[in-house]
Image (cartoon, grey):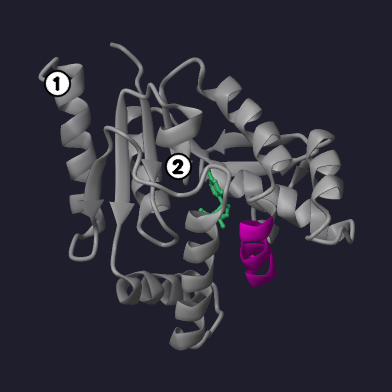
Amino acid sequence: MKRLVITIDGPASSGKSTTAKLVARSLGYLYLDTGAMYRAVTLKAMRAGIDLRDTQGLEGMANQTDVDIVPDPGGYRVILDGEDVTESIRSREVTRASSIVSAVPGVRRRMVEIQRRVGRRGGIVAEGRDMGSVVFPDADLKIYLDADLDTRALRRKLELESKGEDVDLDEIKRDIRMRDTYDSRRRHSPLVIPDGAIVIDTTDLSIDEQVNRVLTLVERIVGGDV
Ligand code: DC
């Protein structure tokens, strides 16, 4: 059976990761979390004390950086220059700074190069902001997930709570709004609905419903209906 390239784009906390992970698992595909790659580069920059306004410094560092997403029984591990950073890239500081680092063209160039290398073989669910628009414009299936801000903020709050962090809902909303603005207004590869993408609003959908909608679309493609 043909191994497809499936892209899932959308704003923060729209359900992309959960959906992409489960769709990939159900199809036996690789889940490529490209946000995790930008987070890893961000972590490296922060550790190195690089000023986030220093575009050249960030680009130079990115070119010397290797980021890998390695499948493992629990999901996947994020490897930065040989070090497992799966957990440390999820801190609030990294989350905030990742919008700034990911807007730097040279950082994106390096990450896109790695993403395309991984995607070449097909059998991939690639999740991010520019997967269907820039990185894999010829993808077999492009999805754009969205949900209203209150729903996204609540999801993020529950996710943080499950990790033992109690953060004020309004603060989360502010963070998400700020990242949305950054990610969709930047000059290079902003968040857009890619040409040919199918938009799914997940505000009132359960995780099962989100996943099943995508899998139904996959079946249609594999069955030759579209
Ligand atoms: O999806 P996420 O929250 O893990 O993404 C972290 C940051 O990286 C986010 O601010 C947007 C950016 N990003 C991007 O610019 N392009 C991608 N393909 C994926 C994420």
> Ligand 1 within 8 A of label 2's CB?
yes
- Give the residue displayed 41% in from the left and 22% down from the top: 123
Q: Is residue 203 left or right of residue 15?
A: left
**Would you say residue 99 sits in the magenta stretch?**
yes
- Give the residue displayed 59% in from the left and 48% down from the top: 36
Seen in the picture, residue 201 relative to 4 is either above or below; the reply is below
- Residue designated by label 1: 226
Magenta span of residues = 90-100
Pick whichever of labels 2 and 1 is earlier in the sequence. Answer: 2
Q: Which quadrant: the C terminus?
A: top left
Look at the magenta stretch and give its main secondary structure: helix
Q: Nearer the viewer, residue 20 or 152?
A: 152
Residue type indicated by callout 2: Glu
Q: Position of residue 13 (x, y in %)?
A: 41, 62
Q: Position of residue 63 (x, y in %)?
A: 80, 34
Seen in the picture, residue 3 relative to 30 is either above or below; the reply is above
SS for tag 1?
loop
SS for tag 2?
strand
Q: Position of residue 145 (x, y in %)?
A: 31, 51
Residue type indicated by callout 1: Val
- Label disc, if present, on residue 127 of the rendered structure: 2
Q: Is residue 169 left or right of residue 98?
A: left
